[in-house]
Image (cartoon, rainbow, N blue to C red):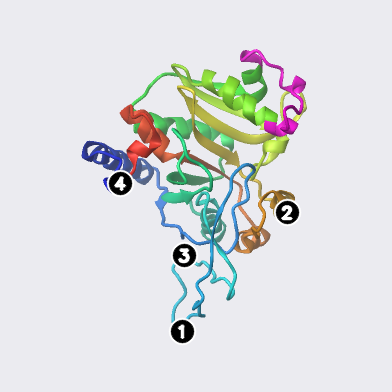
Amino acid sequence: MPWRPRASLETLRARSAIVERVRRFFAERGVLEVDTPLLQPGANLDHGVMPMCVSPASDQQPAASGQQPAASGQQPAASGQPWYLPTSPEHALKRLVAAHRQDVWTLAPAFRAGERGVRHQPEFRMLEWYRLGWDDARLADETVDILRLITGLSGPAERLSWREAWIRAGTDPDAVQAADGFSREEHLDLLLTERVEPLLGRGCWTILTDYPATGAAQARVRRDAQGRPVAARFELYRDGIELANGYHECSDAAELRARHVTELPLHPGCTLDESFHACLVEGFPDCAGVAIGFDRAVMLALGLPDVASTMV
């Protein structure tokens, strides 16, 4: 069985230097570095992303008398209840933002079932942060700044709406229908990957904005210049590679619960993360958040063939 790390020593040293640059970037801006837990009592529910469930140990017991709870504030699951590995540190970070009203960032492991390829691995690192009082447009600019720092790639940044990107690729998204066993939404996702994304970020940074409201995930919904409902969300591309996904965060507890309840049947066996929903009920501040696929950014920075080459 292969045992050697996939990343070379040279790659690991370069990656370490990048991490230190990221740490200085946030320290200079007063954003607090935090650690987030690797077990959640409920799943992150995002369209097309499959969480990993961890079966409880048979000898799981409540904390002994006098034992202090974990520093993360994570509440223990009931006996026999499954735990979930985070698909991103989103829920834990949002609980911190809700509790302390503080800009925070982390570089944390994330886990997604069934993902493996040139740009995907089932375990990877997510660089994620939240900015109080910011919207998605302002956060997109900061995301370009840090990606320039990580990758060493310069060039201008362009803003392009989701609809404009389709038209540039020669396809009208309104004309896309269900086909070959795919629903319309699945067909759109497939064509976006095959036809639209490869054209984005060529010689520049492309900030893709104004996604359809159906793709809002945990972003707010607003109106575009034509009065259409769109997600207050952006994705950032370079050389055809998606590197970041950010939101002007939805703070409506009832709306987010409704979205997650709708998503739940697409994730058989999963349960809602009630600790996350509880923090929303208590009151979630106006903020924007973004996640960068850190391994992809390192791959781009070092000219490596795949994300696996950046990892131990």
Nearer to us of marks 2 and 4 is 4
In the depicted structure, whether residue 279 falls above or below residue 158: below
Residue type at mark 2: give it: Val
Residue 239 location, quadrant: top left
Compute the Cα span from label 1 to label 3: 18 Å
- Looking at the picture, tell me which residue is in the foreground, 121 or 213: 121
In the rendered structure, which disc, 3 or 2, sits on the residue that comes first in sequence?
3
Given contact means CB atoms under 8 Å apart, are the residues at marks 4 and 3 in contact? no
Compute the Cα span from label 2 to label 4: 42 Å
User: Residue 261's mark?
Assistant: 2
Nearer to us of marks 1 and 4 is 4
Nearer to us of marks 1 and 3 is 1
Residue type at mark 4: give it: Pro
Given contact means CB atoms under 8 Å apart, are the residues at marks 1 and 3 in contact? no
* Residue 107 horizontal/vertical position (percent): 40, 48
User: Residue 64's mark?
Assistant: 1
Compute the Cα span from label 2 to label 1: 35 Å
**Span colored in magenta:** 167-186
For mark 3, what is the residue? 72
Residue 26 in view, yes or no: yes
In the rendered structure, which disc, 4 or 3, sits on the residue that comes first in sequence?
4
Quick one: SS at disc 2? helix
